[in-house]
Structures are given as structure tokens and as C-alpha cells.
Image (cartoon, rainbow, N blue to C red):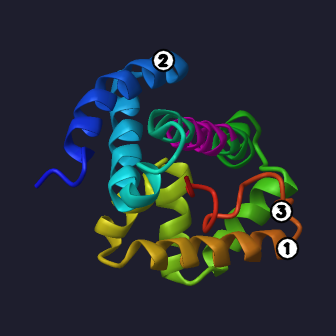
């Protein structure tokens, strides 16, 4: 079962990844999710990873990239929530941006809207969204990308607001 030290590597790195990412994110549950996804990627790329100068450094780089992506998504959706939800509650009439975002979301095909809302508003992982939607992860990424392109096309998001869903989680 142990493919040239893969099992031993994962057993050694798991607590280290959880510990360091817990400190970085301030949340052990989220750190465990990041560490798990990191070790999945290690397993998928083990032949290449084990050849690296430092497989541990490779794993930690992937973990930090995943954690940073998580933080970017949260920050983006905090801003969108303020625009689309919280600001709307504080005024009698929603401003033009709130109305435009809500209108554009309703114009999206159902699958795109569902992927976008679950992925960013609910802050679920691509894997979780795929399970909820009953489709492959790449389909979730495609739906998300198309939804974001539609919002960008209407001038509601710029290129830097939300990273490309196809490349954002690449380790």
C-alpha cells in the first residue's frame, strides 16, 4: 500500500500542516480541510513530489495557496454581501449595484447561479458544491467561471475581484 514512503509522508505531514494552517487561518476545522485537500494533491502528484528537493515544502506551499484562496473568497463575498444584502437592509431603497447584482444573478442559468452562490456566498469548496449539485468538480468550475464572466460582462465585477475558478485552487 505504501508507495515509496507516501503513507509515512502523509502521517508525518498531517499534524504539521494542520498546526501551521490553524495558526494562519485561526480555525482548526478549516485547517483540517486545507490539510486534507493538500494531502490529496500530494497523493495525486506523489511521483513528482517525492522527487522535489523538499516534499514537505511542496506540501506546505500547496496548503498556503489553498488557505489564501479560501481567505480571498471570503473577503470577496464579505464585500458582495455588504453590497447585495447588508447595505440593502440599512436603506429603504437598494442602490443600483445591489439591484444590478440581484438582477444579473436571476438572469444566469440555474446551474451557474447555484454554483456561484454555493461556491462563494455559502463558501463551500468545489468538491462540496459538486456533491450537492451531483456533477463533476470541473463542471462546477465551468459553471462558476461562466457566471463570473457574465457578471464581469455587465460591469459588476472586475478581473481582480474574484480569481479565475479554474486556476484558483491549483497547487
73 on left or right of 30: right
Residue shown at the point (35%, 45%) measured from the top left = 39
Report x, y in % for residue 23: 49, 15
Dot 1 crowding, Cα within 10 Å, few <14, some 14–19, many 20+: few
**Please, what secondary structure does the residue beneath circle 1 have?**
loop
Dot 2 crowding, Cα within 10 Å, few <14, some 14–19, many 20+: few
Residue, far left: 1
* Disc 3 and disc 2 in contact, CB within 8 angstroms: no
Q: Alpha carbon of mark 1 to alpha carbon of mark 2: how far?
A: 36 Å
**Please, what secondary structure does the residue beneath circle 3 have?**
loop
Label of residue 26 in the image: 2
Report x, y in % for residue 115: 49, 68
Q: Quadrant of residue 150?
A: bottom right
Report x, y in % for residue 52: 52, 46
Q: Quadrant of residue 13?
A: top left
* Disc 3 and disc 1 in contact, CB within 8 angstroms: yes
Q: Alpha carbon of mark 3 to alpha carbon of mark 1: how far?
A: 6 Å
Task: Give the quadrant of the N terminus.
Answer: bottom left
Label of residue 156 in the image: 3
Magenta residue span: 62-75
Amino acid at each position: 500500500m505504501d508507495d515509496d514512503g507516501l503513507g509515512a509522508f502523509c502521517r508525518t505531514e498531517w499534524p504539521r500542516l494542520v498546526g501551521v494552517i490553524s495558526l494562519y487561518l485561526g480555525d482548526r476545522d478549516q485547517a483540517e480541510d486545507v490539510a486534507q485537500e493538500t494531502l490529496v494533491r500530494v497523493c495525486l502528484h506523489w511521483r513528482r513530489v517525492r522527487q522535489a528537493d523538499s516534499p514537505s515544502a511542496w506540501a506546505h506551499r500547496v496548503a498556503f495557496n489553498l488557505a489564501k484562496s479560501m481567505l480571498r473568497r471570503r473577503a470577496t463575498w464579505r464585500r458582495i454581501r455588504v453590497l447585495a444584502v447588508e447595505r440593502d437592509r440599512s436603506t429603504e431603497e437598494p442602490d443600483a449595484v445591489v439591484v444590478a447584482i440581484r438582477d444579473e444573478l436571476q438572469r444566469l442559468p440555474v446551474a451557474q447561479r447555484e454554483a456561484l452562490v454555493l461556491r462563494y456566498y455559502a463558501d463551500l469548496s468545489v468538491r462540496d458544491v459538486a456533491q450537492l449539485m451531483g456533477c463533476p468538480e470541473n463542471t462546477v468550475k465551468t459553471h462558476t467561471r461562466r457566471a463570473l464572466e457574465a457578471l464581469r460582462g455587465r460591469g459588476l465585477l472586475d478581473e481582480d475581484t474574484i480569481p479565475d475558478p479554474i486556476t484558483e485552487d491549483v497547487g
